[in-house]
Image: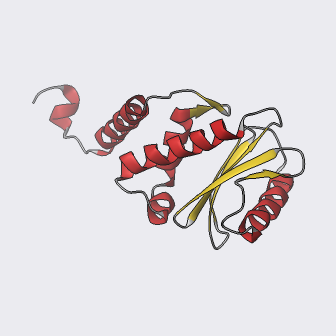
Amino acid sequence: MQFMLLFSHQGKLRLQKWYVPLSDKEKKKMTRELVQTVLARKPKTCSFLEWQDPKIVYKRYAGLYFCCAVEDQDNELITLEIIHHYVELLDKYFGSVCELDIIFNFEKVYFILDEFLLGGEVQETPNKNVLKATEQADFLQEEAETPRSVFEEIGLT
């Protein structure tokens, strides 16, 4: 996978994860063109798109588009399954994920994606493993944010 984009049906970019090195200018240009192209397509058209060099695979869930760029030889159906699996992970973590969850908890959305995909390749397939790692990170974050007394710090409680 070369990159994953998540954007709203208004064209607002909500997540971008790039697995290939490109300049910021190239990323912005590609993103703008791709979002316009996908949004211009009719709802009943195919979710696969030959676009420039990479092949684009996208899926709309409610008001959000999950869009991935893959190599020509990659299987589009597997990419659709990866997108669906990622949406399932977000649903299980947030309870029914919505655009506001992604906006206000973007660090968790990226963390879940990084636990699931590494360098554009699927790293962890069982949902429970990804969610367990996310819960452990949440626990560590909460523990670090919890104020401690001086006595707890030196072990006198």
Left or right side of 74 for 12: left
Residue 27 percent coordinates (x, y):
80, 53
**Which residue, as the protein is rendered here, is positioned at the far front?**
44
- 138 is higher (above) or lower (below) than 66: above
Residue 155 falls in which quadrant of the image?
Answer: top left
- 144 is higher (above) or lower (below) than 129: below
Residue lying at 55% horizontally and 67% vertically, measured from the top left: 63
Residue 77 percent coordinates (x, y):
66, 39
Quadrant that contains the N terminus: top right
Residue lying at 51% horizontally and 33% vertically, measured from the top left: 115
Residue 96 percent coordinates (x, y):
38, 57
**Which residue, as the protein is rendered here, is positioned at the far right?**
52
Residue lying at 64% horizontally and 74% vertically, measured from the top left: 10
Residue lying at 20% horizontally and 37% vertically, measured from the top left: 150
Q: In this orientation, which residue lies closer to the viewer: 127 or 155?
A: 127
- 58 is higher (above) or lower (below) than 36: above
Q: In this orientation, which residue lies closer to the viewer: 78 or 129?
A: 78
Q: In this orientation, which residue lies closer to the viewer: 101 or 42?
A: 42
Residue 127 percent coordinates (x, y):
42, 34
Count of numbered tags: 0
Q: How is the image coloured?
A: secondary structure
Quadrant that contains the C terminus: top left
**Which residue, as the protein is rendered here, is positioned at the far left?**
157
Left or right side of 37 for 93: left
